[in-house]
Image (tube, rainbow, N blue to C red):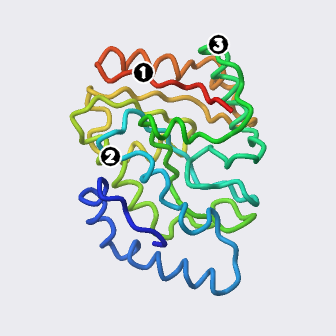
Amino acid sequence: MAGTVPESWKPALDPALETPEARQLGGWLRAEEEAGKTIYPPRGQRLSALELTPLDAVKVVILGQDPYHGPGQAHGLCFSVAQGIPPPPSLVNIFKELESDLGLPRPSHGCLEAWARQGVLLLNNSLTVEARRAGSHAGRGWDAITDAAVAAVAASDRPTAFVLWGSHAQKKAARIPGLTGGRHLVLKSPHPSPLSAHRGFFGSRPFSQVNAFLEAHGRGAIDWSLPG
C-alpha cells in the first residue's frame, strides 16, 4: 500500500487491509511505478489524511474522489495542494464560499493542513492516481480501505460533521452503515467544481453549519482561516 497505517487507525483498517483487493494494491502500485508510470501523490504522502488526523480527533469528514493528477499538486489531502502550487478551480470555489459564509479573506495558498490538524479528515476515495489520468486508480483496492475509515468515524459516539460535495461523495457515504443515525451532521450539496458549483454549492454555507453543530455538541469550532 506504500505506507504504514497510523496506530490510531489500525484497529479500524486492519480487517479492510486483509481483503483480496487491498492485499493486491501494494504490489500493483509497485508494478506501475517499476513500469515507469508517475503516481501521485509521491510515496510518503499517500496516507497523510490519516496521519494528520487521528481517528479519535476527527470532528469533520470531507470526502473527495481521487488526488489531483498534475505535477506537484497532490500531497495526500483531498482538495488541498502543496504550498507554492496555485489552487485548482474547485479549491478556488471552496475559498469563495468560505469568504461568503464566514467573511474570511481568500487564502494566499491552497494547503489545507491546518484544517487537518484541527480534526478535519480530508479523505479521497482513492489515495493514488496516475499522472494526467483522473480516476485511473479507482477500483484497485482503495475503496475497501477508505470505506472502512469513514465507517469507523460513523460508528463513533462522538458527534461528527460529514460534508458531502457532489454525487461521488454522496454515493460513498450511502454505503456506510449508521452514518445517518441521528448523532452526526450530514451536509449534502453539489460539487465545488466550476461545472456544478452554481447549482447549489455556492450559498450552501457548510462552514458555519459545521461550526454551529460542533459548538452545540461541545466539540469546539474549526478555525477555517488559512494564514500564509
Q: Do the residues labelled 3 and 2 touch (CB within 8 Å)?
A: no
Seen in the image, is 200 located left or right of residue 2?
A: right
**Amino acid at pointer 1:** Ala
**Amino acid at pointer 3:** Gly
Residue underneath mark 1: 221
The answer to which of 25 and 200 lies nearer the viewer is 25
Residue 55 tag number? 2
Q: Are marks 2 and 1 in contact (CB under 8 Å)?
A: no
Q: Is residue 63 above or below residue 149?
A: above
Crowd band around label 1 with a 10 angstrom C-alpha radius: few (<14), some (14–19), many (20+): some
Marks 3 and 1 sit apart, C-alpha to C-alpha, by 16 Å
Crowd band around label 3 with a 10 angstrom C-alpha radius: few (<14), some (14–19), many (20+): few
Marks 2 and 1 sit apart, C-alpha to C-alpha, by 18 Å
Q: Is residue 92 above or below residue 64?
A: above
What secondary structure is marked by label 2?
Answer: helix
Residue underneath mark 3: 103
Seen in the image, is 186 located left or right of residue 202?
A: left
What secondary structure is marked by label 1?
Answer: loop
**Amino acid at pointer 2:** Leu
Marks 3 and 2 sit apart, C-alpha to C-alpha, by 30 Å
Q: Which residue lies furthest to the front in this view?
A: 228
- Residue found at x 55% / y 26%: 224
- Residue found at x 59% / y 25%: 225
In primary-sequence order, the first of circles 2 and 1 is 2
Q: Residue 168: x percent and y percent?
A: 54, 46
In primary-sequence order, the first of circles 3 and 2 is 2
* The C terminus sits in image quarter: top right
